[in-house]
Image (spheres, grey):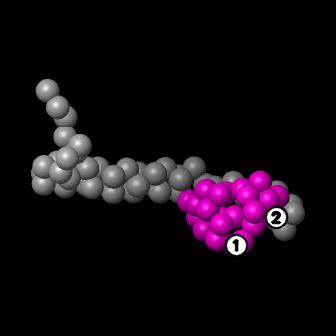
Amino acid sequence: MAGATWEQVAKFVGFSDASTAQRAVRNFFGETPQQDREELRHLLRQRGEVLWRQARRDMLESRPGAGFRE
């Protein structure tokens, strides 16, 4: 579940909350795994690109609230 929040992990596996999911992972692995910084940068860059394309498309289609008002 790379890139998922602890809340998303908890919901996916059926835990009551994020802290329970994080504690379960820590108990299983002995620690909370650290994500590689370069991998995280790549993931965030991809998410930003998706948001940019969606916003641009909405502006080009003149969807309400998608553009700047003067």
The magenta-colored residue range is 1-25
**Residue ID for mark 2:** 24
- Please name the residue shown 73% across and 58% down the image: 17
Residue 16, image quadrant: bottom right
Q: Is residue 11 above or below residue 56?
A: below
Q: Mark 1: which amino acid? A: Val
Q: Are marks 1 and 2 in contact (CB under 8 Å)?
A: yes
- Please name the residue shown 87% across and 63% down the image: 27
Q: Residue 38: which numbered mark, if any?
A: none
- Please name the residue shown 57% across and 50% down the image: 37
**Residue ID for mark 1:** 13
Query: Nearer the N terminus, badge 1 or badge 2?
Result: 1
Q: Is residue 48 left or right of residue 28?
A: left
Q: Is residue 60 above or below residue 29?
A: above
The location of residue 43, given as percent across then percent down, is 47, 56
Quarter of the rendering occupied by the N terminus: bottom right
Q: Secondary structure at mark 2?
A: helix
